[in-house]
Amino acid sequence: MADYDYDLFVIGAGSGGVRAARLAALSGARVAVAEEDRVGGTCVIRGCVPKKLMVYASEFSHVLAQAEGYGWSKADSRFDWAKFLAAKDVEIGRLSGIYASNLAKAGADLVHAKARLIDAHTVELVGKHKTVTADTILIATGGRVSIPDNLPGIEHAITSNEAFHLEALPKSIVVVGGGYIAVEFAGIFNGLGVETTLVYRGPNILRGFDEDVRSHLSEEIEKRGIKLIVGTQHTSIEKTDAGLVSRLDNDVTLTTDQVMFATGRAPYVEGLGLDKAGVALTEKAAVAVDGYSRTNVPNIYAVGDVTDRINLTPVAIREAAAFATTVFGGKPTQFDHELVPTAVFSQPPVGCVGLTEGQARHRTKNVHIYMTKFRPMKEAFWNGTERMLMKLVVDGDTDVILGCHIVGHEAPEMIQLAAIAVKMGVTKAEWDNTCALHPTMAEELVTMRERVTPMQTSMA
């Protein structure tokens, strides 16, 4: 057997890379991890965690409005952006430190450098004038923001990376995109008092989600004050004394303090030397892997967003755990990518698991739909206008629930628990046999008895 410096070398210290490194090291393997940025990756440093903190901060404007309806006197409240940023950065630093500490406790070496493959077993540590060898290599570099570099004036726009560190809140902003990040940041800025316009080239936001979810959320975010413009895209951005002028291909012109592009992320494969090692990529330039996260090069694996399978932090963690169990635990293990729950921390938030109605109808002709829209008790009391959506997609032949979709307060919390039942193959009859918990919003999930027709869902 060849004598290598390490049994495992991990490129990338995000959620997936750290989990794989820790588990491998705890098994007794010699492990090293290279990270060119801060430990923690996208989720901890510039993604899920700071974004959720910003969502929390921005929700208080709505809570304050609700409070008046419940008898609280109006407070002279204001939001201190600088104070929030400082507290946010302290928390991110704390979490990043925990990630690094956990690697050290497991016995893994951490190298702060960009790693580049020279061949299938050799890694160059860029800037360190050093190379190391490893029996197994794991690529866990995640993704990077993707913007249209050929758009005139794109240099004046920011991305989510910069949004976490703005010196001051803008008075107005155009957020470009219709996916998770765009919708979430539109809600954040709007909640913090920024005049917000969301521009998306598609016919409606959240492509790939259930159509009723998309239309319902569109209505609700507009109620919150977000201006939604769909079916159009930028032709240019111009910096003027009045601000940034966004020109759209529908002849609309918008002038705002800031323009933020949130048009997706791409697998981070640049400069990794994958070609030197012979690692194959997919048509979308992601690292191609099999069910065990193995590339076409037998000793090189990849997990997380760099593989562009399901780009969610918990998925990367589970893929990493399966990899460690397979390679260092002696038990071949695959992560099941079916029925993974997901959430959009929009305002109101979205929680989904399983098939959309459209996907189900492509799979089977006999689909039963159960759906309700209602104003929750908390909203109704203070004459709020926000409405909740709950929808179940059921296989009409087997009675198995194929999908569950919720839009409204605490939807992500509900969907995590609902996902357990859906993953286990619960039937609608078994679901209905669960007694309602009153008074809650979630009780509506188990009290939907009347089926709706496709015409009703489209008109609801």
Image: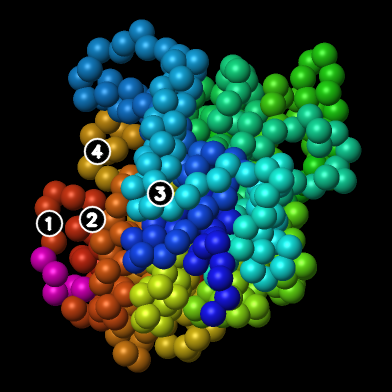
What residue sits 79% from the left and 15% below the top? 242
What residue sits 57% from the left and 75% below the top? 2
Q: Which residue is mark 2?
A: 442
Front label number (1 vs 3)? 3
Report the Cα–Cα distance between label 1 and label 4.
16 Å
Front label number (2 vs 4)? 2
Answer with the quarter of the image where residue 20 lies.
bottom left
Q: Secondary structure at mark 3?
A: helix
Report the Cα–Cα distance between label 2 and label 4.
13 Å
Crowding at dot 2, Cα within 10 Å, few <14 / some 14-19 / many 20+, comes out as some
Report the Cα–Cα distance between label 1 and label 3.
43 Å
Q: Secondary structure at mark 4?
A: helix
Report the Cα–Cα distance between label 2 and label 3.
39 Å
Residue 398 seen in the figure: yes
Q: Which residue is mark 1?
A: 437
Q: Which label's residue is closer to the chain start, 1 or 4?
A: 4
Q: Say whether marks 1 and 3 touch (CB < 8 Å).
A: no
Crowding at dot 4, Cα within 10 Å, few <14 / some 14-19 / many 20+, comes out as some
Residue 249 lies, in percent from the top left, at 84, 45
Q: Say whether marks 2 and 1 touch (CB < 8 Å).
A: yes
Which three-letter amino acid code belongs to the residue tagged 4?
Lys
Range of the magenta residues? 431-435
- For the stretch drawn in magenta, the main secondary structure is loop
Which three-letter amino acid code belongs to the residue tagged 1?
Leu
Q: Which residue is mark 4?
A: 378
